[in-house]
Each structure stands twice: as structure tokens, then as C-alpha cells.
Image: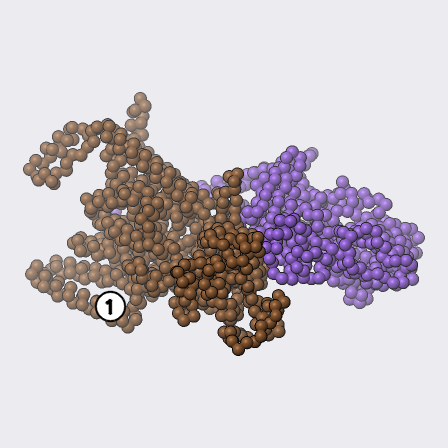
Amino acid sequence: MRFFTATVLGLLAPSLCAASDLTTPSRLDLPSDFKPPQVFKNTNLVRNTNLEKGFVRETINVVVENIDKQPQTDYYVPFPSEVFDQVGAFEVRDKKVPEQGRFEVDTTEAVSSSGNQYFVVHLPEPLAPKAQITLGISYSVLSALSPLPATIQQSEKQFLTYSFSAYTPSAYTTVTQKTKLKFPSTNVPDYTTTGGLKSGSDPERKGATYTYGPYDTAKLAPGTEYPVSVRYEFTNPVITVNLLERDLEVSQWGGNLATEERYWLRNNGSQLANQFSRVEWTMAAYQKAPSSALRELTYPLQPGSVDPYFIDDIGNVSTSRYRPSKGKNAANLELKPRYPIFGGWNYSFRVGWNNDLSSFLRLAAGVNSDSHVLKVPLIEGPKMAEGIQYERVVVRVVLPEGAHNVRFEIIEGATSNGLPGANQIHASLSSLKTYMDTLGRTTLTLEVDSLTDEARDAKLVVTYTHTMMDALRKPFTIFAGLLTVFVAAWGIGKIDVSIKKR
Amino acid sequence: MAQSSLDVLLKGSSGRNTRGLLRVIILCTIAAAAVASRLFSVIRFESIIHEFDPWFNFRATKYLIENGFYSFWDWFDDRTWHPLGRVTGGTLYPGLMVTSGVIYHILRFLTIPVDIRNVCVLLAPGFSGLTALAMYFLTCEMSTSPSAGLLAAAFMGITPGYISRSVAGSYDNEAIAIFLLVFTFFLWIKAVKNGSIMWGALTALFYGYMVSAWGGYVFITNLIPLHVFVLICMGRYSTRVYISYTTWYALGTLGSMQIPFVGFLPIRNSDHMSALGIFGLLQLVAFAEFVRAYLPGKQFQKLLTAMVLLTVGIAFSGLILLSVTGVIAPWSGRFYSLWDTGYAKVHIPIIASVSEHQPTAWPAFFFDLNFLIWLFPAGVFMCFQKLKDEHVFVVIYSVLASYFAGVMVRLMLTLTPIVCVAAALALSAILDNFLVASSPTPESKAKAATEDPKSLRSTRNPVVGIYSYFSKSVVACSVTLYLLLFVAHCTWVTSNAYSSPSVVLASKLPDGSQFIIDDYREAYYWLRQNTPDNAKIMSWWDYGYQIGGMADRPTLVDNNTWNNTHIATVGKAMSSREEVSYPILRQHDVDYVLVVFGGLLGYSGDDLNKFLWMVRIAEGIWPDEVKERDFFTARGEYRVDEEATPAMKNSLMYKMSYHNYQNLFPPGQAMDRVRGTKLPKESPQLNTLEEAFTSENWIVRLYKVKDLDNLGRDHSNAVAFDKGLKRKRASKKKGPRVLRTE
């Protein structure tokens, strides 16, 4: 385990609004004719594209050599601007020592001359001339898969297409490169065969793995493209969450951690050619035939989760089942939407549950006993074999009233696990008035774009200071309020309003 | 020693305090019981709005919360009654929505994060607690016995006749109206007793609130004048009556006219004329009283006769003149059906088609009121014995409400309060006499006997007392037994009859666990999520409010039923052949048609069972095109199987109900479990609509209206072509011309 980021901001309760913005992702503005300086050379590049899920997951391992005379630190990774915003969880590590952690990455605005946007990777130590480093670049691309045919019959198989360039886009000259595609099944009816790029058949097929290359591209200018597209069977829903709002509410009085998540979900698979037929669906469900419709979501919950609920805009969804945890096993919430979600259909809902706070919150060891440490999963979300893509995630942690000195950090594993860099997370502090609060509760809001369900393992650690006086504020307020009411009632009762003669 | 310490608590001024405290505790407990007994559906299902009308009230409340009071007041709703729209702000009673809006804002001000849905769901139980309190006050005005008020409060709290309209989730006008009704009557009695302007003004205030809440305010508008009229006739005119009535009438009428839906009705509608008439009469009587004080008896008699004849003549002819010229609106249809139960069926089928407008069956009285119904006459009789001004009120109320409750099931609600009052009076009289452990002392008897030996026997108060412990205990035991049975009955009725949300259907699995059939919400939510925001949904009017509330889509007709022709249009579209219906659908921009079909599950409240009402209502407007007779077989049966009439088989409703249904069964074995018949082998062919969605148990079926054919064919040809059938030769026999819109 390593801490990769610690955005530290001490702040006192009264000056909440003064420092409401913790971090804001900023993009570097580049001149319109910007071209990355040709200071690097990719000696060898291997791109692994994983298509097993409803989104594209790519890992590029590249050996980079400094061909300049100066030591260099900034390595540019280009994406066309229309794709750029769909790229999520961009992460670069030193392939040799991944446990050293991720490199700092900046993003840039679009460069108008080339239409590219860049991730700027800052190497932790400048790369000396002639020296080499192996970078492991991983990221996911959301909504890059499109169903073809776009409309299918209800019980037909669904196919997705993925278009990309056989030459991996890079800002630098690449000597040799290849691309490995991993499909969910061996059923790949259409794929581009290249001609004259290399000797022998291209791509090479081996089970569900197709390999384009290796190509010798030392002579090609950087940015040269060779469009390739593949079409493969994916008879699973393409689950896309347009927006996930996740609220974690800490109640120190009640010893409770309440979680509520609100989903706006959509299936981005093939739409129905005809309308929905219940007869056909009943038959298919009876035979347990695979379908491109989303039938059920399984949602593992932390052990000890209680009172789960599954509701949508018009009330309780009665088709859910909760299997409480036994011992150390995770509890399981089986959510069945009201109707099967076919391609193009939407479904929005909310789930929530309670946990005992003691297993998530502890007092910080050492000097200051008022300092609390809260450790919760950053996102949970259903666990589906076909994967889930989140276009936007908003996590709100509602801390007790009067909490101050709020800091947070995100802990992730040794290998990449689907999170963007710290400076891609928008964090802000605000206050939320609820349940007879006077000051309002300190609320930490984290906003992340383009996540996938791989980020399920990441943990969010929030530390804050909350004193005894803060905890006693509310009982005092209520006491004072009731006292006022009684005194007022007594006073009003004393007034004589009769118009009789005395 | 314990005896004496008890005495300290129960006697003297501290005894009064103890009793007062006990009374407060008992009342709070009664209120809590009233609230608790209405929560069955929340505990069993969830916090959900029930039935149909509450969904509209809920939607209107949400609109009020979101857009503020003034835009609510001026709300023109273009999402109902497409394409006409509805001036919703001016055609509803805003009291309910404003009440829950105020509660919501108060809670929000205290930063209690309550959902408006929960405010709405729990409003009725909350107000029923208040009703019990109001009942206590009202009954305490009737009787000197302190137990009568408490008994009445308890009865009111749990009697099924009131629970039926106030369980959690039944967010309807009645939820607050019954409280207002009872409380207004309490204030009125108080005003008449004291002759006080303050109480009269308070009566007017709560009357205004009642007017803003429920159309049933007309009951108060007529009952109070009737009370005053009877008092005058009994020769009980007094300044108290004059002060309280004039105060109430002047302020109350002004208050009621502030509601846009009521507007000028109080001076233009026949329903309100009695209040105006009594107001005038009261002035005359007051004048006569005034004159009488100054004139000798003979002259006064003459003057009085002349004046009475003159005013009656003027008033009557004026009324007739105004009615004929149309300044005063005639009685409304619902009002006529109160006097002639057959009226609605003949003239306004839409009113008759609502089950709650049917006459009450006799068992319903016992079902809703249990033993109160036979204590009721006894209580009324006891009122005759005392017959003060307030007792006259009870008697009039009882007579009127009994009649109305017999005519319309729904009006059982207005009967319930007075039944509780009367029954509590009777029962408290029994208890007060039989629960006294000590025998009446002979001294008092002797004293009573020797009080005034010269007076008439009948004017003497006979000493009534129960001496035998046996009879005391028998009566006490049997009353206790009746009370216990009453509680058991109320709980049972509430739990079994009145606590189903009707949006969700519950059944039991063989292992006893609850199985929920949630088809309505499944389909509504599908509509909400997967159709364009302004897709127009056509369905029978019963589901209009639910579609508006849950699916949030525009509808053609809804439970407001203000435009009979529009409803008849929908009825015609449902009951006609596709060739006739399709142009209607196109003309009304219909995108989806919703039908409810219970054939798979045996759910009897489905559209095919309501179909005859659609036919009847359509026939009312188009007697030449839709005929009820065509839907019955030659032998007069209503059938859906092979023998169904051609009109039935070709109707859109029939086709939509059974479309594709036969494929669910082995060939030739399709069954309709509601009507218990075998269906034809082939499912009907739909040409102009296509199935868009069918819920899990087939209860709700949605059809999409096809667009015009791209090649300009009519839909039956297009479908036949798609199926590979050979096109029929365009024969000489021309079918009915298909109207092409656009």
C-alpha cells in the first residue's frame, strides 16, 4: 500500500467558505501551433487493448529513450480532442518499479493546429541523454465501442465495433510496435486485415487474442494513422452510468455511517429493432438465454451493512433481495430493475444502507485525541462481469457538524486500479444544513470524470478534527430552542386580551 | 392509608388537576392510537401514495413546492387533457396542498430533511389525531359527562368509516376535511351557545379553510342554516343565534369566495341559496322581534302576517326569476343524484361509473361503524330528552347525514362524526350509571322525594339508581365486551379492507411470505424513463392521475372528468374498429396507448371489465356510431371468447388486451382467468398499433401508435404485406373510408 496523494488543507470551521476549493483540475494552455519537442524516441512499444468489458482498457508498455542533449522530464501522450474527455484513469508508472507509484500527469487544452490534446507525464527524475526508461501507461476509454448493427431483434446476438489506429498514436517516433487485442469470445466476424505493413498475415489470431504487428515504424512520422476496426460479439449489456452521486454521512452521535448512491444508468448496446415483446422475453428468461438486456445487478456490500434499500423516483423497487453477510463474506444486494434494460433504455435508481461507524472511523493515534480518521471505499457500485463505466462520479462525505481541519487522501494498490491522478479529482468543501444544524455539516465533495468499476478497490481516507464542544452544540441548541418556545408560550398565555370590563 | 392518599389525588382542586392531566394523557393516547392504526400500509408496503386521486394531489403539491404559491395559484397544466389542458389552479381545492406545503416548509425551516412524499403520506394520519381531539371538544359541548367526549374521541380515532379515507398514503381532500368539518361544527356550537362574535368569526375562519379543502363544504353551508331555521321554527330565536349566524355567514361567505374554484358560487349557485335565505330570514325575524318590543300584540300579528307573505312572495319570485334567467346556476348533477339514485345512471353515466357514487349497501353500515350504528339511535333519542340548541343540531345532522350516507357510499364519511357523538352520548350515559360502585344513598332519595311535594309527579326528577351489583357487573362486562369487539373489528377492517395501496398488489406465496405484484409501477417507470418527455399517453381516465404522477407524461383524460366529450372520445377510440380509432389517435397526437389487462393473473379490475362504461359514455355522445347493444351477444351475454360479437372482437380495446396473448399458451389453450373463458385460437391482429411494453404479469400493456406508412399504404395492407400475405384484389366492396390525417 502506498499513499499517492495527500492534498492537505488545514482550515478552521469559521472560515469554511474562505477556502471552499481544495483542488481544481486545471489544464495547461498551449500555443496553437504547439508540437511536442522531439526529444524522445520510443524504441519499443506494446499496446494491450482489452475489449472484454463494456469499455476499452488499454495498457501501453513503451521503452523511451532520450535523444536530446539535455536531460528531459516531460513526455507527451496525445489523444484527439474528441476522445480526450472519454479517457479515464490515465496512469503512468515506471514499469520496472511499479511500486514506486504513479508519475504526476498534467492535461492540456486542445491544440488547434493538430486537434490533439495531451497528457503531460512528468518523470520524477530527469532522463539523462541516451538513457532509457520503460513506461507503463494505462487508461480506459469510455463510450468508444459502438454496436453494429445498431438495432437488433430482441433475442439476437449483439456485436460491438472498435475502431483504432494500427499505429499507436504517439508524439514521438516509434521504432517497433505491436497491438494485442483481447476479445471476450472467439466470435469475431469482422476485422481489418492490413496489407503490406508486415510480412505474414496481419493480424495474427490466437483464440480470443488478435495481434496487429509487430511493425517497423522507424521511418514513419509521428502521428501517422492506419485505421483498423474490429467487430466482435458482446451479448451483454453495455452498462453506462451517466452520473453517480454517492453520499456518505458520518454520524458520531448515532455511531452510524449512512451511504446512499444515486445512479442514472443507461444501456449503450444495440437498440431493439422492433418493440419489446414480453412473450419472447418470458421464453428467453425461461431458457436463461444470454441477452443484451440488463436483467440484474449484483452489489456486494461491506460486511455488517444493514437496512439496505433500493428505490427509484416512484418508490420502493420490490424486486430486490438482500443476502446479509455471514462472517467475513461480503453481503450481497441483488438488484433487479423494474424492467429489463435493453439498448438505449434508461434506468435511474438509488440504493442505500447503514454501517456501524466503528469499523470505519478511529481516533488518530498520538497527541491530538480530537482528530478522527475515516476510511471508506471511494466508490462501491455493482460488480458485473461485463464491467460498468461511470461518466461522472460525485462523492460527498458529510462530516459531523463543526468538523474542521479536513484533509483527504486516496489509497490505492501497488498496481494500477483505475483511478486518475490526484490533480484530476475536483475536491471542494461546503457546508450542509440538516437535522437542526446551526452551523451546517462540513461536506467534502470529490468529483471525478470517466471512471470504471476497476476503481472499486480504492479507499478514501478523510481526517478531520471534531471536539467535544462541537458534539455538544446540538443538544444545547435544541435545549435553548425548546426553552424559548416554552417561555414564549408562557408569556403569551399571560397576556390578557379580553375586552370585558375589569 | 392508600385510600386517603388516593383521595388527596382525586378530590378537591388537586383532584381536578389530576383529572385534567389524565384527560390530556388519554387524549394524547387516543391521538397516537388513531395515527398508529392508519400505518398498516406503510409498515406492510412502503411510504407510498395510494389509489388515484391522491396522485394528482401529490403532483400538485410537488408543483406548489417547486414553483411557489403564486404560480400554483395560476397553474395552467398543459400535461393533462391534451390538447385542451386544464386550468388546474382554478379548478382545485388548494387547502390540502397548501397545508402540506406549509408543513413542509416549517420542517425545512427547522432543517429537518423530510421528503415531501412523506409529508403527504402521513398527513391524513396526523390529521386524524387532530380529528379525535376536535371530536372530544364537540362532544363535550353536548354532554356534561366528561366520559362522553373521551369516548367520542376514541370512536372517531379508530372507526373504519373514517379510516377508510384517512389511512397513510390516502392523500385526499377528505384527509384534512373531516377534521375541519368536526372542528367547524364545534366552533359553531360554541358560537351558538355563547352568542359570541369571536367564536362566530372562528367558525367562519375554519369554514373558509374547509371550503379551500373539500367540495363537501356545501354540507356545512346547508347544515348550519338548517340548524338556525329549525331553531327559529321552534321559537328559539335569540340574539345569540343572530350574532353567531350573521358573523359566520358574512365572514364565511367572503372567505369562501377567495377560492378561485368557488368564486361567485356562494351567491349564484342553488346549493348555497339556503344560507343566503336564512341570512335574510334572520334579519326579518330580528326586525320582528325588535318591532314586537314596541307594538301591542294585535297590530304586531297583522304586521307580521303581511310581512311574511310579502317577503316570501318576493324572495320566491326573485329566486325563480334569477334561476330562469340563469343568474343562479341550477343544481349540479351530483346533487340531483343525491335525491334520485337512478338519475346519474340515466343522465350522467360518468358519475354512475364511479363505484363510490353508488348507493350504500346495508352491511356497509355495520362494516364501517360496527356497534356504533345501533348506539346511534339511542344517542339521538337522548338528545331529544335534553333538546338544547346544540342537541337540535345533533338531531338535524343525524337525520340528514343518515339519508345521504344511504344514497352514496362516499358520504358515509360525513355520517361517521355524528354517529360517534351520538354513540358516545349513549354509551357514556350507560357507563356513568352502571360504573358507579356505590349505591345511591337513601338520604338523597329521601331528600329528592321531600323536595317539593306539591309539584307534579312528572316534573319531579325521579331518582334513578342501580342498586344490584349483579346488574352493574353484567352491564359493565357486556359493554367492555362490545368495546373490545369494536376495537378488534376496527383493526381487522383497517388491516384487511382499507390498507391496500392499490398501486401495488400483494399476494401470499405458499410459504407465507409476501409476494408483491408491481406491474403498474413497472410500466409507469418504463414510460418515465424511456419515452420522450412529451409523449402523449391515452388510457381510460382512471389511470390519468397515476400516469401524470408516476410516469410524468401528458395524458388525454384523467380522473378530473371535467370534459365528458373528451372522455367519450377516448371511449369511442377504445370501442371502435381500428380504422375508426386510428384517425382519432392521430388527431389527438397520441403516442402510446395504455390498457390494463388482468387476464393472466385474474386481476378483475381491468379495462375489459370497465369496457361497458366506455361504450356507454361514448354512446352518450355518438349514439349512431357506438352502440352498447353491439357488444352483447344475441342472448344478451357479455363475452370475450369465440362467441364474442364482431363489434367486440374488432374493438381496439379487445385487440389490445389480447394481442399476442395466445402465444403464451400451448395452441388452443389460452385462458382468460378474469372472465374464466377460453379464448379464440388466434390472437387478434393489430395493424395500427404495435406493442411497446408489457409488464411482467401483463397487467399493464403499452402500445405505440404507428406512424403513417412510408409507402402510403394503409396499415392493414402494410402488415399483410410484411406477413407475406397476398394482397387482396381491390374489390368493388370498398371498406369504410380511412380518414388520413396530415
Q: Is residue B716 left or right of residue B304?
A: right
| Residue B719 drawn at (x, y percent) | 59, 67
> In the figure, what tint was chain B given?
brown
Residue occupying image coordinates x 41% and y 47%:
B498
| Residue B401 drawn at (x, y percent) | 29, 52
Residue occupying image coordinates x 63% and y 46%:
A397
Q: Is residue B5 above or below residue B63?
A: above
Residue occupying image coordinates x 34% and y 50%:
B413
Residue B308, picture quadrant:
bottom left
A379 vs B206, nearest the viewer: A379
The total number of labels drawn is 1
Residue occupying image coordinates x 35% and y 45%:
B367
A109 vs B533, nearest the viewer: B533
- Badge 1 amino acid: Leu
**Colouring convention used in this rendered image of the protein:** by chain
| Residue A201 drawn at (x, y percent) | 88, 58
| Residue A391 drawn at (x, y percent) | 68, 55
Given the current orientation, which residue lies at the most extreme top position?
B1
Question: Which chain is displayed in purple in the rendered image?
Answer: A
Chain of the residue under label 1: B
Residue A445 in sight in this render: no
| Mark 1, other Cα within 10 Å: few <14 / some 14–19 / many ≥20 | some
Given the current orientation, which residue lies at the most extreme bottom position?
B732
Q: Is residue B25 left or right of residue A478?
A: left
Q: Quadrant of the C terminus of chain B?
A: bottom right
Q: Is residue B593 above or below residue B403?
A: below
Residue B678 in sight in this render: yes
Residue B290, picture quadrant:
bottom left
Q: What residue did someone put label 1 on?
A: B319
Q: Is residue B19 above or below residue B500?
A: above
